[in-house]
Amino acid sequence: DAGVIQSPRHEVTEMGQEVTLRCKPISGHDYLFWYRQTMMRGLELLIYFNNNVPIDDSGMPEDRFSAKMPNASFSTLKIQPSEPRDSAVYFCASSTDRRTYEQYFGPGTRLTVT
Amino acid sequence: AQKITQTQPGMFVQEKEAVTLDCTYDTSDPSYGLFWYKQPSSGEMIFLIYQGSYDQQNATEGRYSLNFQKARKSANLVISASQLGDSAMYFCAMREGALIGANNLFFGTGTRLTVIP
């Protein structure tokens, strides 16, 4: 079975440019999460969706960040305009309505903003 | 207050020996779940083991076991018979609240485990 798929795996962009990160959750999973990992702040939850509806976006750092989930098999995280401090690894994870709710993570997108 | 605390930034263990990675948590909710994830140098996050707050027995998954001490609010990961491939960052995480609508995880800062040949 395919796991969580993220693209691109690496992204290098200049400050001020728009960046779009993509995620395909595991088929049948009804929760989708976006995390950011940095050395300074560790792993932070940015936003999560349940059945395509955003449930908690309190972790989204500022209005430059937006996330959408137009259908059960696709989500995007957009940064516009990007800044050097946005450089991080962005993970997408999915889970489903089971006893444990363990989250399955994608390989991550390493974003570098110069 | 931090919801998950991992006090060991780094740990070393001899190959084939057992090692315990510490994790304490803070919640007032009676319903919660505790998780351990492994992050090797390649970067992916790998789910290892889960313990529910109402589970009577400590969770085990192969060489991984979770030493769950509810009164102390600790959920230490024990890796038995360490292997070189166990060298990685290990994260403790918690889900708190009702299962429906409160599914986000709070992660600790991680412990870097190095297995010595």
Image (cartoon, rainbow, N blue to C red):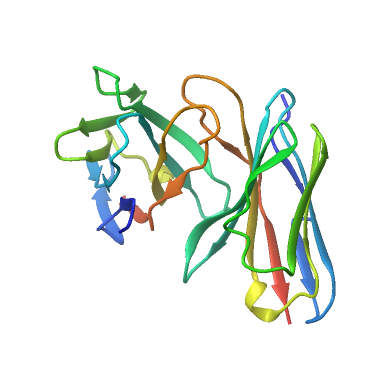
Of residues B117 and A81, the one nearer the viewer is A81
Asked which quadrant contains residue A85, the reply is bottom right
Name the residue nearer the viewer: A112 or B55. B55
Q: Nearer the viewer, residue A30 or B100?
A: B100
Could you tell whether A69 is left or right of A88 in the image?
right
Name the foreground residue: B71 vs A13.
B71
> x, y percentage for residue B47?
49, 35
**Residue plotted at (51% across, 28% down):** A101
| Position in image of residue B95 (x %, y %) | 43, 38
Report the quarter where the N terminus of chain A lies: top right
Q: Residue at x 25, y 40 (%)?
A: B76
- In the rendered view, does B94 fall on the left or right side of B81? right
**Image position of B91 with respect to B61: above or below:** below
Q: Is residue A25 above or below residue A76?
A: above
Q: Is residue A8 visible?
A: yes
The correct choice, above or below, for B97 with respect to A64 in the image is above
Residue B10 location, x and y as percent? 30, 60
**Would residue B112 be found to the left or right of residue A92 on screen?**
left
Question: Residue B67 sits in which quadrant?
Answer: top left
Reply above or below: A110 against B16: below
Q: Residue at x 52, y 42 (%)?
A: B104
The quadrant of the rendering that contains the C terminus of chain A is bottom right
Q: Residue furthest top?
A: B56
Say if residue B87 shows up in the picture: no
Count the labels in the image.
0
The quarter of the displayed image where residue A50 is located: top right
Image point 25% across, 58% down: which residue?
B7
